[in-house]
Image: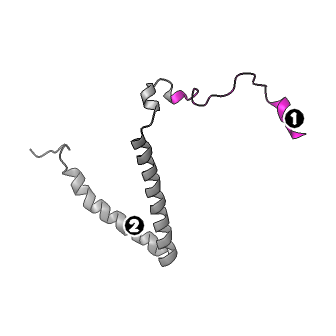
């Protein structure tokens, strides 16, 4: 019953099946070499996903073990330490513009 109602509601596609790879308009004007992923790119993407999942599970473990408020406080303290130590390094790194010459 539902199938016949759906068939009448949708127009019939005869030979006009969707080709997702051909209809990707964002890559339509890119060279074909940009559309192929090397094994290194796939591996780096997988490694990034695994690192995210590991970070998520470690954070969840800390939150469950020590409590949410303590975990959030620890994350905030770590972010402050990273910001305080990273900002001077980023501003004095080679290649950045400096006003004192």
Residue 93 higher or lower than 26, as above or below:
below
SS class, disc 1: helix
* Residue sitting farthest toward the bottom: 66
In the image, is 70 to the left or to the right of 81? Answer: right
Picture residue at 42% right of the left edge, 41% below the top: 39
For mark 1, what is the residue?
5
Tell me if residue 18 is in the magenta stretch.
yes
Q: Pointers 1 and 2 in contact (CB under 8 A)?
A: no
Secondary structure beneath label 2: helix
Q: Was residue 22 drawn as part of the magenta stretch in this picture?
A: yes
In the rendered view, tell whether residue 81 sits above or below residue 38. Answer: below
Residue 46: x %, y % from top left: 46, 50
Instruction: Where is residue 19? Give x, y as percent.
Output: 62, 28
Residue displayed at 60% across by 31% down: 20
Rounded to the nearest angstrom, the CA distance separating label 1 from label 2 is: 55 Å
- Crowd band around label 2 with a 10 angstrom C-alpha radius: few (<14), some (14–19), many (20+): few
Quick one: 87 or 5, which is closer to the camera? 5
Label whose residue precedes the other's in the sequence (1 or 2): 1
Residue 76: mark = 2
The quarter of the image holding the C terminus is: top left
Residue drawn at point x = 47 percent, y = 67 percent: 59
Q: Locate residue 3: give its quadrant.
A: top right
Magenta highlight range: 1-26
Residue that lies at the very extreme toward the right in this rendered image: 1
Seen at 36% across and 63% down, the residue is 79
Q: Residues within 10 Å of mark 1 (few under 14, many from 20)?
A: few
- Most foreground residue, 25 or 85: 25
Indicate the colouring scheme.
one colour
């Amino acid at each position: 019953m539902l199938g016949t109602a759906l068939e009448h509601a949708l127009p019939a596609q005869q030979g006009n099946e969707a080709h997702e790879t051909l209809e990707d308009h964002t890559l339509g004007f890119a060279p074909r070499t940009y559309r192929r992923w090397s094994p290194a790119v796939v591996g780096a993407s997988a490694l990034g996903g695994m690192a995210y999942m590991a970070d998520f599970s470690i954070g969840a473990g800390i939150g469950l073990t020590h409590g949410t408020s303590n975990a959030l406080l620890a994350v905030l303290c770590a972010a402050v330490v990273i910001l305080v130590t990273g900002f001077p390094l980023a501003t004095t790194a080679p290649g950045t513009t400096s006003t004192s010459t």
